[in-house]
Image: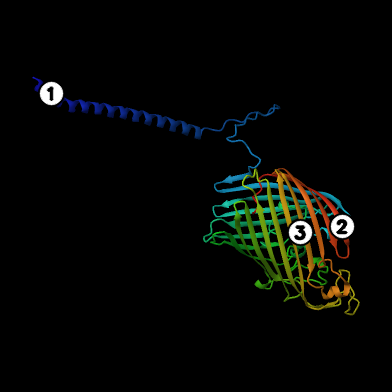
Amino acid sequence: MKKSVLLALVMACPRLMRGQDAAVVDALKNELRELRQRTEQLEEKIKKLETAPPPPSAPATNAPPVVTTEAPSSLWSPTKPITVGRAGNSYLNLSFDGLFAAGASTANDAQIPALQPGGHDPIQRGFTVQNIETTFEGAIDPFLRGQANIVFQLDRNSETTLELEEAWLETTSLQGNLTLRAGQLLTDFGRLNSTHPHSWNFADSPLVNARLLGPDGLRNPGARLAWLTPTPFYSELSFSIQNSAGETANSFRDDHGGGAYLGRAHNINGLRGLGDMLFDARYMASFDLTPEQTILAGVSGAFGPNATGRHEDTQIYGVDLYWKWKPSNQSSGFPFVTWQTEAMLRHYHAGAFSEDFDGNGTIDLDVNQNGVIDTVPAELLKDWGFYTQLAYGFHKGWVSALRFDYVDRVHPGRYEAVFGDDPDRTRRWRLSPNLTWYPSEFSKVRLQYNLDERVGFGVDHSVWLQFEFLMGAHGAHNF
C-alpha cells in the first residue's frame, strides 16, 4: 500500500511542476502586454504635444510681468567663470580687470614719463588708469583653446587708447609633449615679459624690462612651439618666430616715431625675408629643493634686425631665477616668501649714416628738430641691467615686498661722446618698498614708495597708491 502511494506521488510531481511553470509564463505575458499598452499610450501623448499649435500670446497689459525662477542646481561662487554660450566642448569665459594708481613725485610733470618708463606705469600726479583689461578665454574644440586680452588706457591728456595685448589659439592634443601657439603673442622672454601688469608684485615695471625690451614689453604677431622635455624634473624648451617691427619691438625694427633713438634715425624697410623676423628661444627648469622650497631657473635669447641699417641686428640675452618657500602648515597660501631676479644684456649693432638731417646744406654735428645729428659711425652698443625683488606674505591677505633696479651701459657711444649722456643708456637705479593688502582674490590695494637716482637728474621720490578689482574668473598665472 505504501509503495503504491509513493509511486503515485512521484508520477504526479512532473505534472504539478508543469502546471506551475505555465502559470508563471502566463503572468509574465500579461505584464508584458500591459507594458506595451502603456508605451503606446505615452507615444500617443508625445505626438500630440509635438504637433499641438503654440498657445496664443497674452494681450499686452500695463501690469508688470510675472517672473518665475527655478532653484539653481548649485550655489553660485565668485570663482565660477562668467560663461557666454556653451556648445559641446566649446565655451567662452569672460573676465574684466581694472588697475588704477594715484600718487605724486618730486619730478616735474614733464619728467615723470621718463622717470616711469613702463607703458603701464603711473605717469602723472593724481590718478592714472594703468590697465583696463577684458579677457576672453575658452575651448574652441577638443583640439584647440584660445585667449584674447584687450586693453584700454587713458594717456596724460585723458585720451583713450586701445591695444590688443594678446590674441592666440593653442593646441591641446599634439603628440610628443609639444604645444603650438599662434597669434598676437607676448614673447616668451624672461619671467616678467610674458605676464600681465595686474599680476606684478609692484606698481610699475622694472627699469631693465622697460629699457631693453620696450615700454610695452616685447610682443608681436607670430608663433611659439614649446616642448615639455622628458626629464625627471619639470623643464620646458620653447622657440618663437614673430614680426620684428613696431613699438612693441623697441630694440628691433622700430622707427621710434621718427625721433632719435640711441642718437640715430631709424627707418623701417619692407620685410625682405625670413632674416627680418624676430627669433626667440627660452629654456626653463624647476626643482623642489625641499618639500617646502621650489626653485625655477630660466635662460632666454631674442635675436632680430634693427632699423639703423639693412644689415644691422640686435641680440638680447637674459637669465632669471625664482624661489619660493611655503611651509607645510600654511593656511590659504600664507605665510610665504618669494625671491625673483632677472638680468639682461643687449648687443645693439648700430649702423653708420651720413646725411644732411638738419637741412643746413652741410654734414655736421648739428642736431635737427628730432634730435638726430648728420653723421654717426657704425658701432656696437652694449647695455645691461637687472632687478631683484623679495616678497613676504606675513599674514593672510598681506604681502610686503622690496625691489632694487639697476641699468647701465658698458661704454658710452660716439653720439654720447659729442653730446653727453643719453638718457636711454645712462646709469640709473631705483629702490622700491611696498605693502599690498588683498581683501580677497578679486581685489587689492598697494602702497609703494620709489627712490630714484638718475645721472644728470639727481634723486627723485615718488609715492603711488595702486588699486585693482577683478570681475569673473581669470586664468591661473604661471608658477
Query: Looking at the image, is mark 1 or mark 3 nearer the viewer?
Result: 3
Quote the CA–CA distance across marks 1 and 3. Answer: 107 Å
The label shown at residue 460 is 2
Q: Amino acid at mark 2?
A: Asp
Q: Are marks 1 and 3 in contact (CB under 8 Å)?
A: no
**Residue 202 at x, y percent in the picture:** 76, 53
Q: Secondary structure at mark 2?
A: strand
Q: Amino acid at mark 3?
A: Pro
Q: Secondary structure at mark 1?
A: helix
Q: Are marks 2 and 1 in contact (CB under 8 Å)?
A: no
Closer to the camera in the image, 207 or 180 = 207
- Dot 1 or dot 3, earlier in sequence: 1
- Give the residue at the far bottom of this rendering: 362
- Dot 3 or dot 2, earlier in sequence: 3
- Using the image, determine if residue 287 lies above or below residue 443: below
The label shown at residue 6 is 1
Quadrant for residue 168, please give it.
bottom right
Local crowd at mark 3 within 10 Å, few (<14), some, or many (≥20)? many
Quote the CA–CA distance across marks 3 and 2. Answer: 16 Å
Closer to the camera in the image, 194 or 248 = 194
- Dot 2 or dot 1, earlier in sequence: 1
Q: Which residue is mark 3?
A: 206
- Using the image, determine if residue 360 lies above or below residue 207: below
- Using the image, determine if residue 409 lies above or below residue 405: below
Query: Looking at the image, is mark 2 or mark 1 nearer the viewer?
Result: 2
**Residue 429 at x, y percent in the picture:** 81, 61
Q: How is the image coloured?
A: rainbow
Closer to the camera in the image, 119 or 168 = 119
**Residue 75 at x, y percent in the picture:** 61, 35
Quote the CA–CA distance across marks 2 and 1. Answer: 120 Å
